[in-house]
């Protein structure tokens, strides 16, 4: 592949990914409207007379004030099973996952729930994906749902402009004091009376934020009376998860610290204050969170009031749960309307949640508990909630986005109004309305620009065909770009006379027209390989494996176990090589082939590394690192300097200096295969040398058995490299990101450098794989880019087809993001090889480079 073709291929593929992404990940409209503090804004009639009675100081906006002050405590990544009381059965089930370190280490919560059941409540608190802190805080304060691409703002948060209970508090001249994660200060920069915030991104710092919160929290709680809401955000549990995982003694000690805090909180809590303790998300078994599993979305919500009961009881259970068989879980957006009405605030305009019914199912009259009176009081809260949602739909013209569904929703609302005399029927209909409104909103937020998506797929296919069946002509490029830009410029003037065949926005339109014209006009195409061309047995076998791999990308089941699929395909690749050796009777190749089979089996069975595993062991570290040292002595002895630095870093010698020696050495010796190896070992931790040593042995044996840079050899090697990506601890979910790698050698968080380190940790397997190719010729790089481009194309088409699937955001969208990123990364690595002189330079000719 000549250098010019490398550049054009990279640009075309990146443009195709951007074009599809622009149509698939649309941003949500952010409403600027704000709810007002008037009774008419709450409900257009006197339906909620039980909820809001004129009563002096307790009279609020849309409801009476039940709790004038609130303590709002976020324990980041507080998974539900961290807080609830685990049974003996659950402890045995989770023992293999290190359950002894995170189960039943908050015993004070269990004691409060037993001793004061009417004054406390514990619920499973279900988050919407993506479960990143910024997106969760946005949902927890506004009641809205995050979009998938909001994940990009997690490290660079901007001020929230939508209505929220924080904005409602400041509008009513209420005071808020904050301490903890500095993300809050970025989201609400002018809302806090006092702000004690701390940097939140150094995941290896387990104590600074938590100690800062503890330093200020109780003096504010006990000694200060000028606040209405006190917010504290602890980060230690989340950072332990990212650094060590939940199954580590550090998690046990951190939960003990949180338990001691909760003991003091319940003892010193003023009588007029409601304590809200919650997790913004959970964490996976390796301590990360992206939203794909129940452990990541299932957080805990604990409510406590010292003086006033929170809910009515039937023996030891909430009476509402007994009467209505209610599940012990709520959506995180449900806390927003609940907290607003308990404090007498208007519900934020964009809220999509429903009030937590247990907290409003209370008898307001004198004497014994009256179920009818309690249900009427609860229905009043539900009416206010339903009117707020309906007002939002009508004001923002949401009704036009899915008219049939909105008409059905209106029928439910009308039926609830018609059944006003039957409290039970009204309750069921209002709950149905609120539940269906949330489901409809989730669907409406998932709107797609099919034109941009189709053009993105078309450009991917065109770039793939141009790369493999055409030859780039540099002198044709200006004409191709000119034609594309001309069509993109003139299209708005003729679009009124034809159907919308191009994206409407300027950038996607120019990407589509310029990209497609470049693929069609800047390449000279040759005919396809004729049927008479001789194909070897191995070529046919590998072609079938590629087809099987592409087909597996269209299967829900195989998509989530792609690591196992690739292990099978790579093993089959090795078997095909062995068949060739036997057929050609290359008996001298049998011993290295048998050794290759053994190494591949060890590679498949070797534990996946993760930088959170920091223990240096004989099996995982010493022996494989010794093997890597021997290999480095052969390929580039000077790299032993970097090798020694990695060793010393693992023993905490100059931890802020030695990693930069490794980084600098790598930059100075980019052409040496030992350079990417040592950076990857450093960024994956002491559990990683075995994985990389086995891959190097496997790659060396594979190339020694077949030295020709043929298409079958390169395709087989692509399977091995792709397998390394998964075997090095990565996957197709954001939970697989090893975030701690972003802080190797860093004293403070710097998001540009951290992003580069995390990218190298995630996609470095492909860097190492390309570096180990003996002779990266034109044909080799063409096949490598073609293999990963084809994988990305199949995933893109599958995601487009399944865009309405239930698991699109939990599984399919992350899969697309990672496959697209891998294909762009591989193109970028091939481009870097071209710039370093590893491939031919362009001479401007249009010569055909046939694949053999």
Image (tube, rainbow, N blue to C red):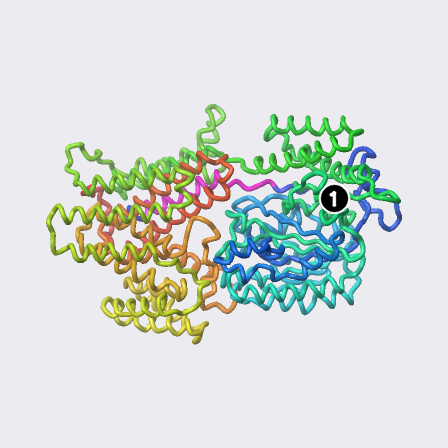
Image quadrant where one finds the C terminus: top left
The spot of residue 235 in percent (x, y) is 59, 61
* Residue 14 among those drawn in magenta: yes
What residue sits right under mark 1 in the picture? 319
Q: In the rendering, at what x and y percent does residue 204 appear?
A: 51, 66
Q: Is residue 642 placed above or below 413 in the rendered structure?
A: below
| Residue ID at (30%, 44%) | 786
User: Which of the two residues, 542 or 842, is positioned nearer the viewer here?
Assistant: 542
Say above or below: 191 vs 162: below
Instruction: Tell which of 501 and 246 is nearer to you.
Output: 246
The residue shown at (40%, 49%) is 821
On the image, which quarter does residue 795 sit in? Answer: top left
Give residue 726's position: percent from left, percent from top.
Answer: 37, 52
Q: For the point 49% across and 63% down, which residue is it?
A: 244
**Residue 462 higher or lower than 699, as above or below:** above
Q: Is residue 346 magenta?
A: no
Is residue 800 shown left or right of residue 606?
A: right
Q: Identify the magenta region.
A: 7-29
């Amino acid at each position: 592949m000549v250098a010019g073709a490398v550049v054009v291929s990279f640009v075309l593929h990146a443009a195709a990914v951007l074009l599809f992404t622009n149509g698939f990940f649309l941003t949500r409209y952010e409403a600027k409207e704000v709810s007002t503090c008037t009774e008419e804004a709450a409900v257009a009639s006197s339906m909620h007379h039980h909820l809001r009675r004129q009563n002096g100081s307790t009279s609020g906006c849309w409801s009476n004030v039940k709790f004038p002050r609130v303590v709002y405590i976020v324990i980041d990544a507080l998974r539900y099973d961290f807080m609830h009381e685990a049974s003996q059965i659950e402890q045995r089930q989770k023992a293999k996952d290190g359950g002894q370190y995170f189960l039943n280490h908050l015993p004070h919560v269990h004691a409060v729930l037993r001793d004061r059941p009417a004054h406390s409540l514990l619920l499973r608190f279900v988050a919407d994906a993506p479960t990143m802190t910024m997106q969760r805080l946005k949902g927890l304060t506004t009641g809205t749902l995050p979009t998938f691409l909001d994940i990009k703002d997690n490290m660079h948060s901007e001020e929230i402009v939508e209505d929220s209970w924080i904005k409602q508090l400041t509008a009513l001249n209420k005071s808020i004091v904050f301490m903890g994660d500095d993300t809050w200060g970025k989201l609400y920069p002018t809302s806090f009376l006092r702000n004690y915030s701390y940097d939140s991104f150094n995941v290896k710092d387990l104590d600074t934020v938590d100690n800062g919160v503890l330093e200020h929290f109780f003096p504010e709680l006990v000694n200060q009376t000028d606040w209405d809401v006190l917010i504290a955000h602890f980060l230690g549990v989340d950072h332990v998860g990212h650094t060590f995982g939940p199954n580590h003694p550090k998690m046990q000690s951190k939960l003990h610290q949180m338990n001691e805090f909760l003991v003091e909180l319940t003892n010193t809590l003023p009588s007029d204050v409601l304590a809200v303790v919650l997790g913004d998300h959970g964490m996976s078994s390796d301590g990360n969170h992206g939203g794909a599993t129940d452990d990541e979305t299932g957080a805990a919500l604990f409510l406590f009031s010292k003086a006033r009961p929170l809910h009515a009881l039937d023996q030891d259970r909430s009476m509402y749960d007994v009467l209505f068989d209610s599940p012990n879980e709520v959506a995180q957006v449900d806390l927003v309307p609940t907290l607003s009405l308990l404090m007498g605030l208007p519900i934020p305009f964009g809220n999509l949640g429903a009030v937590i019914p247990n907290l409003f199912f209370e008898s307001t009259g004198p004497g014994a508990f009256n179920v009818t009176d309690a249900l009427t009081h609860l229905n009043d809260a539900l009416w206010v909630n339903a009117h707020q949602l309906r007002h939002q739909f009508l004001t923002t013209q949401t009704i036009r986005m899915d008219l049939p569904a909105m008409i059905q929703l209106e029928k439910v609302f009308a039926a609830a109004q018609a059944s006003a005399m039957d409290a039970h029927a009204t309750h069921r209909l209002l709950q149905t309305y609120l539940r269906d409104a949330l489901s409809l909103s989730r669907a409406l937020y998932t709107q797609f620009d099919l034109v941009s998506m189709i053009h993105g797929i078309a450009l991917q296919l065109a770039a793939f065909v141009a790369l493999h069946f055409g030859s780039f002509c540099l002198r044709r490029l200006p004409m191709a770009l000119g034609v594309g830009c001309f069509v993109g410029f003139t299209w708005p003037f003729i679009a009124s006379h034809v159907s919308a065949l191009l994206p409407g926005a300027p950038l996607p339109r120019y990407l589509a027209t310029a990209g497609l014209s470049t693929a069609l006009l800047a390449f000279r195409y040759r005919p396809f390989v004729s049927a008479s061309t001789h194909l070897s047995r191995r070529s046919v076998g590998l072609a079938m494996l590629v087809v099987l791999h592409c087909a597996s990308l269209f299967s829900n089941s195989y998509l989530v176990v792609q690591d196992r699929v690739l292990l099978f395909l790579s093993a089959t690749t090795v078997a095909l090589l062995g068949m060739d050796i036997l057929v050609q009777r290359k008996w001298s190749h049998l011993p290295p082939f048998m050794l290759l089979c053994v190494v591949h089996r060890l590679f498949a069975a070797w534990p996946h590394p993760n930088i959170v595993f920091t223990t240096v062991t004989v099996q995982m570290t010493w022996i494989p690192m010794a093997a890597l040292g021997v290999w480095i002595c052969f390929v580039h002895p000077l790299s032993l300097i970097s090798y020694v630095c990695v060793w010393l870093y693992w023993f905490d010698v100059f931890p802020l200096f030695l990693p930069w020696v490794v980084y600098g050495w790598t930059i100075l010796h980019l052409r040496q295969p030992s350079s990417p190896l040592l950076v990857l070992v450093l960024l994956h931790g002491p559990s990683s040398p075995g994985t990389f040593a086995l891959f190097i042995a496997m790659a060396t044996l594979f190339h020694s058995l077949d030295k020709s840079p043929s298409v079958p050899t390169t395709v087989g090697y692509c399977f091995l490299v792709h397998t390394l990506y998964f075997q090095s601890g990565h996957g197709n979910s954001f939970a697989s990101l090893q975030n701690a790698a972003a802080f190797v050698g860093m004293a403070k968080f710097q998001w540009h450098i951290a992003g580069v380190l995390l990218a190298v940790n995630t996609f470095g397997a492909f860097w190492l794989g390309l570096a180990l190719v003996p002779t990266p010729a034109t044909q080799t790089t063409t096949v490598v880019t073609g293999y990963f481009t084809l994988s990305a194309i199949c995933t893109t088409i599958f995601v487009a087809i399944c865009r309405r699937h239930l698991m699109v955001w939990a599984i399919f969208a992350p899969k697309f993001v990672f496959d697209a990123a891998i294909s762009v990364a591989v193109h970028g690595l091939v481009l870097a090889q071209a710039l370093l002189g590893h491939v031919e330079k362009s001479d401007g000719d249009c010569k055909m480079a046939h694949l053999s």
